[in-house]
Image (cartoon, rainbow, N blue to C red):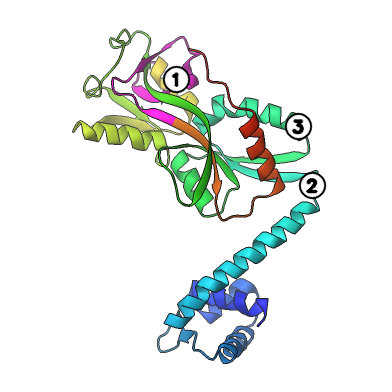
Amino acid sequence: MELRQLQYFQMVCRLNSITQAAKKLYVTQPSITNSIKNLEKELSIVLFDRSKKQLFPTTEGKVFLKRVDEILRQVDNATSEMNDYQNLKTGVLTIGIPPMIGTFVFPKIFIDFKKLYPNMKLNITEYGSVTTKQMIEKGELDLGLIIIDSPNKLLSSLSILNSELFVCLKKEHPLSKRSTITFKDIKDEPVILLKEGFYIRQKVLESFNEFNIQPNIILSSNQLETIKGLITNGIGISFLMKEVVEDNKKIAKIPLSTAIPLEISLVWKKDRYLSNASKAFIDFLNTNPIAPHKS
């Protein structure tokens, strides 16, 4: 049994087609066909149901596929680890950081981390916490600094900072003098939200729904400066972390009567090989906790 045979088998299972698998792997169709026949002969089982137009693994094939996925994942991890050992002094990290978290958490992390590891290269992607979490689960990112609200069986996490969601409105707004605000207080207010894929949007909509309120959403954006500008011009209200707007004197930050806590954590996929660069970043945050902002 050869590694190449397992790779061919896995790709045919994924695409349900020898033709498509051959194109994906840049090999000829006969190469894959013969490889799978030899594999079936060696195992003395039929791996695919060939009675239909597309190829689907048999019951035995599905069991074998689970083992093959595990073997090839271990091979990928071993290859990555060996490559990593050749580049101990350098490394590349791909980190997902939602824009809101990036504005007040990441700059100091980046500066201090680069002082310790000047040759490390960090590639940053900016999506909401929901989208970033999904990308990490798929193995598309090494790490993510996101908002999480419950344990995830696919991810490991390191808590970085606890924050809270505040109602943000123009300083002169009639509600700006309140000590707290309820969702009923703002049921008729024009609301500006972050776009789909952001945890905060999801949480705000859930809260409106709990009170049977249909929010008057006038705009959705992933640009924080745009949202803050609309707030200061009295166009609408929004929901942001207090840290994001605490230096803006034109915006009032009012706590919700029923607080919506936010936990920012560094997350990574449990079964994915952690490069030395990833381990260094995790260790750095574990030993250099982020100090909370002053009110």
Instruction: Give the image location of residue 27, x and y in percent.
Output: 65, 78
Q: State left or right for residue 71 relative to residue 127.
A: right
Give the vertical position of 275 relative to 192 (above or below): below
Residue 58 visible in image: no
Q: Is residue 203 magenta?
A: no
* Quarter where residue 117 is shown: top right
SS at badge 2: loop
Give the vertical position of 68 relative to 73 (above or below): below
N-terminal of the two: label 3 or label 1? 3
Residue type highlighted by circle 3: Leu
Instruction: Give the image location of residue 180, x and y in percent.
Output: 30, 15
The answer for how far apart the CA atoms under marks 2 and 3 are is 14 Å
Q: Which residues are magenta?
A: 233-262
Residue type highlighted by circle 2: Leu
The answer for how far apart the CA atoms under marks 1 and 2 are is 39 Å
Q: Which residue is mark 2?
A: 88
Residue type highlighted by circle 1: Lys
**What label does residue 116 carry, if any?**
3
* Quarter where residue 285 is shown: top right
